[in-house]
Amino acid sequence: MKKALILVSVITCLTLQAFGQVSESVVTKSELMEKSKRQKKTGFILLGGGLATAIGGGMLAFSSNPDSSSEDLGAGLFFLGVGSMVGGLVMWVISSSNQDRAEELTLGITPIDLPKETYVGPPGIPSLTLTIPLKGRK
C-alpha cells in the first residue's frame, strides 16, 4: 500500500510539472545566434576551469606526500575537472547546432500557390522559413 501511494504521488508530481511548462514562442535568428554565443562562452569557461581543476587534482593526488586524504581529495578534484571538461565540450556541440539552426532560419516572402484565375490578392505573404537540410551537416 505504501509503495502504491508513493508511486501515485510521484506520478502526480511529474504530471503537474509536465503540464506546468510553457511552450516557447517563435525563435528568431538573432535569438539563436545570441544563445549560441552564450553557450560557446559557457563551454569555454567549463573547459578551461575543468582543465585547471583536473591538473590541480592530479598534482594533489600524485604528490610526494603519501597522505591518503590529500590523495582522495586530489582524485575527486581530478574527476570533477574531467566531468567539467566533458560538459564544456557538450556545450560547444550544442552551440554549433544552434548556430547551424540560426543559419537555416530566414525571413522572406512565401508565394501563395493558388490559381491566378480565382485568386485576387498579393502574390505572397511574409513568412519565417526553417530550411532543414536532408544531406546532414555541411
Image (spheres, rainbow, N blue to C red):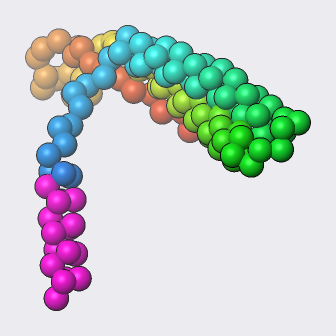
Among the 4 quarters of the image, the one containing residue 86:
top right
Magenta residue span: 1-16
For the point 77% across and 44% down, the residue is 67
Q: Is residue 106 above or below residue 81?
A: above
Instruction: Work out whether residue 76 can be spotted.
Output: yes
Q: Is 104 in the magenta?
A: no
Name, please, the residue furthest toward the bottom.
1
Residue nearest the viewer, comparing 15 with 23: 15
Report the predominant secondary structure element of the magenta stretch: helix
For the point 14% across and 65% down, the residue is 12
Residue 34 picture location, percent across and down: 42, 13
Instruction: Work out whether residue 92 can be spotted.
Output: no
Residue nearest the viewer, comparing 125 with 43: 43
Residue 97 picture location, percent across and down: 53, 29
Position of residue 62 in the picture relative to residue 93 (left or right): right
Name, please, the residue furthest toward the right.
64
Q: Is residue 23 above or below residue 131?
A: below
Residue 17 picture location, percent across and down: 18, 51
Residue nearest the viewer, comparing 132 with 75: 75
Position of residue 106 in the picture relative to residue 86 (left or right): left
For the point 53% across and 25% down, the residue is 95
